[in-house]
């Protein structure tokens, strides 16, 4: 740790350690207070928001700013999505073909609506229409990464000098709301329509709250770690090949695909000859690693939010985000649930869509994890949501943003 000019900076090791503590406290609070479980609020969200509020109070009361080295955060995200890939296979993708296409088209249409809402509200407040784009897919469905990547373009082309601050504020507001809306939506749908899972095997992520007999042995854990690392290595090579071909994707996406390839084609054949390569997807060890890596990633993301920066830009931005929040809830409840089949899987998908509509792919997965830990597995949701959110959404968003920039230029 370093203290320079009223800034307390946590280096990577201390940041990860604090994130583990934040996750531990979040899980403890969820176990203690049933209301958090009833509304399916993700555990890292509980701990992360609590600590970000504490850090904001420290900033306002004694003028000390707390900053974190987040270098390890992306590693946790890669770990998490690799486990999702290893828990899937090609047959899962075939089964999820129609729902995946339906969700993809619905998400693409929603992205257009999100930009229209942002531009409309910005115009009502007398702001440049492009400011509404910063409060649209640039920062909401796009998340912090897309916001940071595109903000300089808006500043240069349209003279919006605080474009970065606006984009980050919108992304942060969206992340908070997305973390809080997905679980309650799914809980409402499950209870209202008396929905139940038709699957009885292990969860894709985490362990059920009422599972008192979950067991992990030495070799199952070692198998899981080995599978993850081999998948990441293949994902790294795949990422480099695609980049050389002109297609740049986040590393966690190619690692997800590497996991799918391994679980579909390599593991079944190799396990017949070498029993130590039998990684047994969907086992408790893999689910636990997925839960911890996602939890630490989200805990780091939320505890590092500088809420005082958001409050300084709260005016029109709050109006834009409020409008987007209302639209997101309406689309999730009245459109996504119905077109996805009005089933338990549809309710879980809704919790994920609630996460991606205003937040990020990780938020979507955390929402679905919280729901399935309480109500039971939904393998379909954990196959189609990350593929739509982590791959197709980024491609569609680039086309949308570039088209709108050209239109307003």
Image: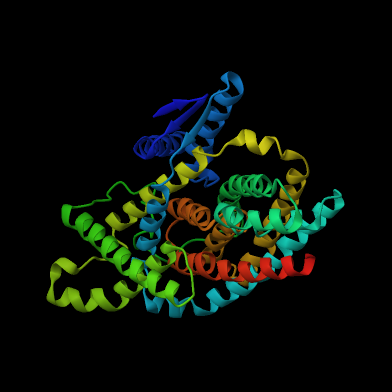
Residue at the (48%, 56%) spot, across then down: 365
In-front residue for pair 61/88 = 61
Rendering quarter of residue 274: bottom left
Judge from the rendering whether residue 117 lies leftward or rightward of residue 251; answer left or right: right
Judge from the rendering whether residue 49 lies leftward or rightward of residue 177; answer left or right: left
The quarter of the rendered structure image containing the N terminus is top left
Image position of 408 with respect to 209: above or below = below
In-front residue for pair 65/86 = 65
Image position of 348 with respect to 173: above or below = below
Image position of 117 with respect to 27: above or below = below
Judge from the rendering whether residue 104 lies leftward or rightward of residue 277; answer left or right: right
Residue at the (41%, 54%) spot, across then down: 77
Residue 357's spot in the image, x, y percent? 62, 58
Residue 319's spot in the image, x, y percent? 77, 46
Residue 375's spot in the image, x, y percent? 46, 54
Rendering quarter of residue 252: bottom left
Residue 281 shows in the view: no
Residue at the (57%, 67%) spot, across then down: 393
The quarter of the rendered structure image containing the C terminus is bottom right
In-front residue for pair 178/136 = 136
In-front residue for pair 266/93 = 266
């Amino acid at each position: 740790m370093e203290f320079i000019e009223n800034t307390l900076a946590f280096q990577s090791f201390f940041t990860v350690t604090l994130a583990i503590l934040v996750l531990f406290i979040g899980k403890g609070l969820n176990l203690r207070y049933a209301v958090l479980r009833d509304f399916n609020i993700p555990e890292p969200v509980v701990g992360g928001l609590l600590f970000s509020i504490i850090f904001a109070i420290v900033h306002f009361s004694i003028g000390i700013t707390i900053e974190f080295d987040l270098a390890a955060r992306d590693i946790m995200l890669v770990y998490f999505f690799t486990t999702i890939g290893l828990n899937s296979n090609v047959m899962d993708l075939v089964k999820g073909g129609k729902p995946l296409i339906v969700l993809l088209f619905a998400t693409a249409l929603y992205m257009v609506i999100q930009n229209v809402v942002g531009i409309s509200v910005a115009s009502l407040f007398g702001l440049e229409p492009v400011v509404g784009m910063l409060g649209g897919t640039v920062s909401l469905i796009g998340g912090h990464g897309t916001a940071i990547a595109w903000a300089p373009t808006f500043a240069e082309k349209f003279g919006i000098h605080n474009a970065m601050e606006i984009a980050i504020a919108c992304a942060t507001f969206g992340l908070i709301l997305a973390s809080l809306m997905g679980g309650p939506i799914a809980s409402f749908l499950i209870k209202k329509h008396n929905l139940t899972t038709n699957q009885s095997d292990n969860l894709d992520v985490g362990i059920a709250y009422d599972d008192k007999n979950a067991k992990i042995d030495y070799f199952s854990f070692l198998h899981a770690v080995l599978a993850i690392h081999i998948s990441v290595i293949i994902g790294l090579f795949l990422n480099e090949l695609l980049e050389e071909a002109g297609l740049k994707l986040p590393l966690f996406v190619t690692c997800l695909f590497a996991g799918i390839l391994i679980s579909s084609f390599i593991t079944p054949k190799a396990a017949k000859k070498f029993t130590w390569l039998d990684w047994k997807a969907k086992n408790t060890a893999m689910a636990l690693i997925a839960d911890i890596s996602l939890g630490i990633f989200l805990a780091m993301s939320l505890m590092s939010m500088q809420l005082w920066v958001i409050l300084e830009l709260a005016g029109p931005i709050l109006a834009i985000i409020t409008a987007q929040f209302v639209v997101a809830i309406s689309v999730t409840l009245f459109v996504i649930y119905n077109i996805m089949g009005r089933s338990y899987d549809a309710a879980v998908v809704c919790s994920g869509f609630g996460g991606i509509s205003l937040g990020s792919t990780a938020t979507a997965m955390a929402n679905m994890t919280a729901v399935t830990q309480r109500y039971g597995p939904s393998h379909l949701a954990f196959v189609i949501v990350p593929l739509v959110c982590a791959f197709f959404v980024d491609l569609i968003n680039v086309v949308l943003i570039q088209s709108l920039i050209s239109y307003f230029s």
